[in-house]
Image (cartoon, grey):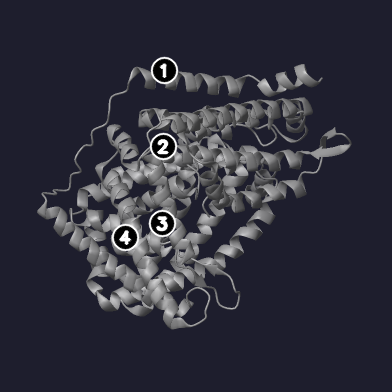
Amino acid sequence: MPKMQTALGRLNSTEALSEKNTCVHRLHPAVKTVITVIYILCVISYNRYQLNGLITLAVLPFIVMPLAEIPISAIVKRMLVALPFALLAAISNLIFDTKTVFFIKGFAVTFGMLAFGSVIIKTALTVTAVLLLVSTTPFTKLLAVVQAVHLPQVLIMQLTLTQRYIYVLVEEAQSTYTAYRLRAGNVKGVQIRDMGTLLGGLLLRSIHRAERIYNAMHCRGFKGEYPAQTIKKVSVTDIFTLVAALSVLAVLRFIPIAELLGKVLFF
Amino acid sequence: MHMADALVSPAVSGVMFAASTAAMVYSVRQTKNHMDEKKVPLMGVMGAFVFAAQMINFTIPATGSSGHIGGGLLLAALLGPGPAFIALAAVLLIQCLFFADGGLLALGCNIFNMGFFPCFVAYPLIFKPFIKKGLNAKNITLGAVLACTVGLQLGAFSVVLETLASRITQLPFGAFVALMQPIHLAIGVAEGFITAAVLVYVYHARPELLDAAEKNQVQAKRPQSAKKVLIILGVIAVVTASGLSLFASAYPDGLEWSMEKVAGTAELESDTVLHENAAALQETTAFMPDYAFADEELQEAAAGTSVAGLAGGAIVLAVAGGIGLLIKLGKNRTKAEG
């Protein structure tokens, strides 16, 4: 099924990208996580009509992407996933918010248009930020950060196991689905009456697998504790990058650069 | 139903993060104290199962469209609500990180909408009473269909409230609700039947699995002192109340109108501790977005965005793009030389 292949492909490609060795990849995972969260906060802190500042925030991904050697196509593909629901919310603005803000060469720009643009740009920037984080940091390292701040063991084990077993179970779901398709003739999707047996079978096989995994873990000395992962120390470069990135964010967020530049150059 | 970061304001995201964290603390405690280590891999694999199961689309009869299960109630029935909540939260985090399905700061909203309602509302209040009457195919089916439908309706309504409170869309409340609820009613009923079919299948093949979840629940409940539960519920109440009051501050007319209908007055005396706490919490969170209204907001917005600003923004972007291109070319050259 294409959907499952796409999902596995995405997981694989993200993991492959995160194994690269660039200056962005070498940064401390905690530093990258903090910068990403604050960046997204900055993006969503603009209200629905403030476009100028929002646009200048796009500067950061434009610089980080080539530095980290992340192809833009990888990001665009994932953005398509997030867009439909955002579009639904955005389009209503075009319809309900029709007061004019200003004219550009006789073309009336409405508040709805600004709000529409704002939702689309916000979606693009927030998706890009998260994607850059996972494409430059292996999942295990992100989990090590989570572990270092003493989040509950059970949560960390849950994330580790789920992420690992998604590969296995999606492949299993895929072969189950292929078997169904081969027998079901020319039908689209799975008939609703067959879903119980199909998912039920998959579920029971998953539970069997969990039992085997437990036995294997138990044989290797598992006592319900997840061993602490080693995480590298924060270096001077990391601290410098953190301070620099946060300063740039503060400048972009609080100084109306776009406005000033536009006025100096054009008006 | 996964909300993107672009659809929430920092205040709404913060409030919902707090609410989900409270539910998470409760779940972790429940899981830690009363679960044998055998369940650890089971929870992990079940999380992955839900992820895989969501990839299998079913055709909704007579419509030509398709849907997939959410899995909240299924997990709650097999693992108990606490572990199910943790498993769902992990799935949602992975979906957000690797698939851009839901935002990172909107994660609190998504965990609450898709995890809290099925695990802590639909399961204990609807599904469990049916199962208590007797574990058989009929009760499982009735319970699952009702619980899934109600759980999804609550989740969808919560999405509407969160989006409107974030002031991202101009869609009127009524229209938004009229759009969201019926769609999710159809999906909820279909999901309910499928969840029921899966559970009945499991019940016939390995009845002890459902039985164990049920027993685990009973054991898990007993040692939790009433005080702890009350404290956690209190935190959730305050957080939800402050979320609602944020919503109220964004939409004073609608709420006052309905209050007049219900209470006969537009103002209520605020003499409860809960209300004061909620007000205090709101004060500390409300500085982030400015809730200016109507003309005032439009004027302010007009001052914020202008032709000059947009032109300047385009220049900044072009320069950044240029720098990015230079870095890329530089890297390519180094690689070619190396």
Q: Crowding near pointer 1: few (<14 within 10 Å), some, many (20+)? A: few
Q: CA distance from mark 3 to mark 1?
A: 36 Å
**Chain to which mark 3 belongs:** A
Task: Name the residue type under label 1.
Answer: Phe
Q: What residue does disc 2 label?
A: A136
Task: Name the residue type under label 2.
Answer: Thr
**Chain to which mark 1 belongs:** A
Q: What residue does disc 1 label?
A: A240
- Note whether residue B196 is visible: no
| Marks 1 and 2 belong to one chain | yes
The local secondary structure at tag 2 comes to helix
As drawn, the label of residue A168 is 4
x 43%, y 79%: residue: A182
The local secondary structure at tag 3 comes to helix
As drawn, the label of residue A8 is 3
Q: CA distance from mark 2 to mark 4?
A: 24 Å
As drawn, the label of residue B249 is none
